Each structure stands twice: as C-alpha cells, then as structure tokens.
Image: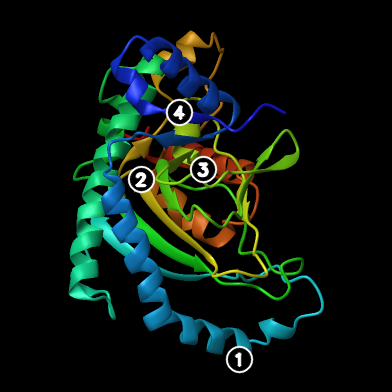
Amino acid sequence: MESFPIINLEKLNGEERGLTMEKIKDACENWGFFECVNHGIPHELLDRVEKMTKEHYKKCMEERFKESIKNRGLDSVRSEVNDVDWESTFYLKHLPASNISHVPDLDDDYRTLMKEFAGKIEMLSEELLDLLCENLGLEKGYLKKVFYGSKSPTFGTKVSNYPPCPKPDLIKGLRAHTDAGGIILLFQDDKVSGLQLLKDGEWVDVPPVKHSIVVNLGDQLEVITNGKYKSVEHRVIAQTDGEGRMSIASFYNPGSDSVIFPAPELIGKENEKKDNYPKFVFEDYMKLYSAVKFQAKEPRFEAMKAMETTVANNVGPLATA
C-alpha cells in the first residue's frame, strides 16, 4: 500500500506548486486524509498548546476520568464494549460565538492561548478550502461561502486525551465513524500513535509527525463535491502504556442554516445524468448524525434525500442562497 500522504505546504510558494496541488488532489480523492507540514502555524505556539493541554488534563481531568471509568466498571471489562469511548474530552466553541471564557477549570493563560490557536487554525482551514476549490475547478471562496450560510461557519475544537487503557482489545479510544462536517484539522500527539483510517478495507495508521496538522474531509465536502472527495471512516485505538495520547481536533463546519448540495459545476464535469447526493440544511443533517454517528454514512444521505423529496412535494424546492 502507498504511504500516507504528507504535504509540505511551503512548496506551494515555489516551482513545485503544481506537484504539491496534485498531491493534495490525490490525497482528497483517494485517502480523505492528509498531513500538513510547514503550514504556517508557529512551532512555538504548537509546543505551548501541547504543554498546557497535557498540564490541564493532569490537573483537572485525570482523576475525574479514572473515577468515571471505575464507576462504570470499564477498568475490568471481559467482553468488547461497543457503546463507550476511552477518552476524556472538553469542547471549545469559536464561531458563531465563543464559549472559551465560560468553560470551567481553564487557567486564564490557557484560555488566551487557545483563542490564539483557534485563530491560526481558522485561517489555515480557509486557506485549505481555497486550495480544494482550485483543484476542483470551483471559484475561489466557493466552499467558504457555502459554509457561511447567513451568518458564519460553525467552528469549534474538541480537546481529547486518551489515557492508557488496560483492555485496548475490548475498548476503543474512539469508535469508527466519519465526521459530519466540513474540514477537520487535527493537532495530535507526536509521540503516541492511535489514529487510524479505513482504506481499501484495511486500517491504516496516521503517523504522528511533530508539529504537523492532520486534515480530514467530512460528510459535507463529500456532498458538495458530488462524491469526488469522500469522507473516510476513522477510529482511535487505545494504548496500554505511556502517558496517553493528546488530540486537538478543530471542526470548520457549515453554519446551522447553510444549505448543502452538490456544486453544479461538478455535476457537469463528471458527466453525470443526475446528482447522487441530496440537498439539505446542515442543522437537519446534524440532528440525524447525533443519533447515528457510529453507523454508516450512506443511510444518512438517503434519509436526507427522502426529507428533500418530502420538502419539495410539500413546499417547493429548498432555497440555495
């Protein structure tokens, strides 16, 4: 199997731009994932984020996690557990409104740092969306415009720690799923592996690379590209030893009222007789996704298609702008 795609974004500024864009295109079409190096986010900032995130877990979350695991009997399971994940998490919302000042137990320095980090990730997300537009032959800013809806995209960060697990063969760090949203940027531990994606029926490790940002595509980009790009199933394998694994995943998603549908240019370019993906409001998709996250994505698309038909029959077509 070919090696996991690692893209040097610095090469976009020189003679190797064409080759680099081709690598991004191949990664989006054949992997749904790639890893960025030289992405413009200062290494010193990433080092501080990693240090303070791990300190916060030790100080505020570790004992709480251990107590929760003990109370649920997960430290002594004897058969596979399919309804829980071996992870400790908290969530930061950035857009359309920030909750960072209200999340409990965060030191002020950590709050300030995560605001700065979120700003850098937001900029990189939008730069990457424009690179995808270029490769797809879409107008620059098309994806960002679709994601904005009437107000702004939905943008937030899930901060996770995956502590050592005594029974990694019975409990996943995070069960297999595709991501519901748009483009996901992950700053992960560079010492402890665990993230895997499903490619050609086999689970492939996403290599931990220091100061890299892992990018993966969500369900909404699959719909907008009319299947040219695919969201890919992935999971986190729990580890038995070490200090545990840090994962900071930022989700740049459509706004709640964004209308998602295949880009007309891509339907024509692929010479398809009909578009295979539905048109829907992102909030409606998320309501469905929250109940069936760990199930296959295809029935979700079919359910939205059925909803689209019902809406069209009752009140006419969904607005696209």
Q: Which residue is mark 2?
A: 253
Where does the N terminus fall, quadrant-wise? top right
Q: Earlier in the sequence, mark 2 or mark 1?
A: 1
Residue for badge 4: 7
Q: CA distance from mark 2 to mark 1?
A: 35 Å
Q: Measured from the top left, where is residue 300 in percent x and y?
A: 57, 46
Q: Amino acid at mark 1?
A: Asn
Asked which secondary structure carries label 4, the reply is strand
Question: Is residue 18 shown left or right of residue 205?
Answer: left
- The residues tagged by marks 2 and 4 sit, at their Cα atoms, a distance apart of 22 Å
Q: CA distance from mark 1 to mark 4?
A: 44 Å
Seen in the picture, residue 193 relative to 79 is either above or below; the reply is above
- Mark 3 or mark 1: name the one nearer the start of the chain: 1
Mark 3 and mark 2 in contact? Answer it, CB < 8 Å. Answer: no
Circle nearer the viewer, 4 or 3: 4
For the residue marked with disc 4, what is the amino acid?
Ile
Distance from disc 4 to disc 3, alpha carbons, whole Å, reads 34 Å
Task: Name the foreground residue: 275 vs 250.
Answer: 250
Report the coloring of the rendering.
rainbow
Tell which circle, 1 or 4, labels the residue nearer the N-terminal end: 4
Residue in the image at 75% along x and 38% along y: 201
**Hey, which quadrant is residue 135 in on the image?**
top left
Give SS at disc 3: helix
Q: From the viewer's perspective, is the residue at label 3 or at label 1 nearer?
A: 1
Q: Which residue is mark 1?
A: 71
**Closer to viewer: mark 2 or mark 1:** 1
**CB within 8 Å, label 2 to label 1:** no
When asked about the image quadrant of residue 171, the answer is bottom right
Q: Give the mark nearest the N terminus, 4 or 3.
A: 4
Q: Is 150 left, or right, of 93 in this rendering?
A: left
Is label 3 or label 2 in front? 2
